[in-house]
Image (spheres, rainbow, N blue to C red):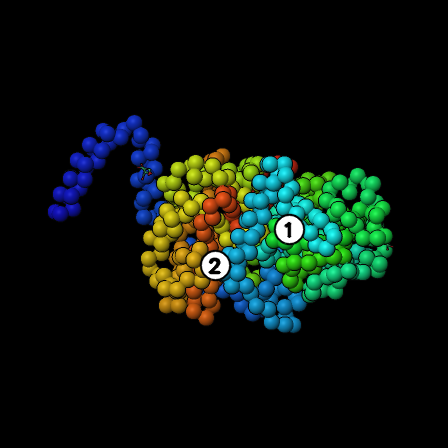
Amino acid sequence: MATSISFAGLSCFLLSLCLVCSVKEGYAFEELRESHAESYLTHTFEVSSLFASSICNHSTKANERESTFIVVDKYGPCFQPNQQRSVVSPSLTDIIRSDRARIYSIHHSRLSKSSGRRDHIVEPNSLSIPVKDGSAFSTSNYLVTVGLGTPKKDLSLVLDTGSDLTWTQCQPCTRCYKQTEPLFDRTQSSTYVNISKTDSVCAYVQRPGTVPPGAETLCFYGIAYGDGSISLGFFSKETLTMSAAEKINSFLFGCGTDNRGEFDLEAGILGLSQESASIVFQTAAKYNKIFSYCIPSSASSTGHLTFGSQTPAPANIIYTKLVAQKSPSYGLDLIGIGLGGTKLNISESVFTTPGTIIDSGTVFTYLPPNAYPTFRDAFRAAMTAYPLTTGRPDDDLDTCYDLSKTSSVKVPEISFFFKDGKVVGMPGKSSLVTYSKTNSQVCLGFAPYEAGDDEIIIGNQVQRTMEVVYDVAGQRIGFALNGCT
Ligand SMILES: *[C@@H]1O[C@H](CO)[C@@H](O)[C@H](O)[C@H]1NC(C)=O
Ligand SMILES: *[C@@H]1O[C@H](CO)[C@@H](O)[C@H](O)[C@H]1NC(C)=O
Ligand SMILES: *[C@@H]1O[C@H](CO)[C@@H](O)[C@H](O)[C@H]1NC(C)=O
């Protein structure tokens, strides 16, 4: 009885509402459908699966491909040298701090570029090196192991879509920081070639104001990163070997004989940006400026970095346009963010005014300060089943949960909406970053960017387990689920 009465009342209400909104019928229908409980997209998984274990679980995909490097977390058990010693992962506060330094340098390079000035000069000793446009470095926590020289020596380099030049520390070394693998010795390789400073490729790199005695006729490079780290040395050619014995001959790289700064464990950097010196452009004839990566789900699993297009293409891949943004990084035309499959009611201009970049080196995802609270509140509203932690790891990470009382967790799907109509739903686990394994605490891996750093950054944690395809020739970026396994 009660049902029929309220139904009659509702029909009456709906009828009058429809008269009012009949011109916006499609819109009204969208709202009704999307607010329906069953269409709210969620992901449920074991809490324990969020945390890294002490044993490496190798992914399969890297082994099925030819032009591939295995990607590992610098601090986890999948990075071979870590099996012989204990490494301390950086805290969430340390990560936020280095993210900020990276964002600053991405932002700064754009400012100096647009104003035509190179005013940020780092002066180590008598050598002055201008900060190279777009050189970020800080925080990139994923490594790939490449084979350099003949016979090949394994070197683990930071995977960095924000850098162009690939370099490693080289023997004989004037100044080298402590790395985990033996230093590359150019005198021991039969394929090492010096580049003359008159060679046209020398224009790919910046030369410091002063070069050491003996290097006057050679292409001596200097690169300074936004965080103050530097590498100086010989721009040279070598044979680069990928995991499956595929070789790139005459690969241009920096043989760094003076390297200082925030480096730790890694042997150098693998540059994947859209500039001439990057491996992407150097191998354009072979791989058509296409590469993809899969960031591992946790520090105890592996991912891959693959060159060239794949056949068959990754299942259900969604491509969106690669667009120019203020910084030289890889830009996307983001117009909105969604939870549970529904776009949040935030004006498109909040996203299009700052613009968006996708980055392999920034850890968290940074949203505009006028969009973040709406997003966070909606995320919290979908997560009321789990208690928020009382303390916070950092002021910027304000949505952390205590999952110690539950074995599985259900999270809303986070999706990115792009101007070309494409919608990419991210894997459920990738929205959370682990905070404390012993207390089963995790945080939403998103934060507002700071005033002045006005660019949205899709960081590496939210990209985990997806195959992210950078089709630079086709000017598009693709996303496919289950990219690592
Ligand atoms: C290793 O990874 C595979 C694929 O992701 C997964 O099915 C399996 O459960 C993992 N094994 C362990 C021991 O975590
Ligand atoms: C490269 O240049 C350095 C510095 O002048 C020199 O010591 C080395 O022998 C050269 N190597 C080759 C292979 O030409
Ligand atoms: C979306 O936000 C605007 C501005 O705050 C508001 O006027 C509008 O009613 C909202 N729309 C919905 C469907 O909530």
Locate residue 451 relative to residue 89 in the image: left or right: left
Q: Which badge, 2 or 1, is on the more N-terminal residue?
A: 1
Residue kind at label 1, given as amino acid type = Tyr
Of the two numbered discs 2 and 1 in the rendering, the one whose residue sits closer to the viewer: 1
List x then y, in percent, for residue 396: 44, 55
Residue kind at label 2, given as amino acid type = Val
For mark 2, does the 10 Å Cα neighbourhood hold few (<14), some (14 to 19), or many (20 or more) residues?
many
| Whether residue 424 can be seen here | no
Judge by depth and name the residue closer to the eye, 396 or 482.
396
Residue pointed to by mark 2: 433
Displayed quadrant of residue 229:
bottom right
User: Residue, x 74% and y 65% (percent of image)?
Assistant: 182
Q: If the image is split into quadrants, where does the C terminus sit?
A: bottom right
Residue pointed to by mark 1: 225
List x then y, in percent, for residue 458: 51, 47
410 to 371, vertically: above or below = below
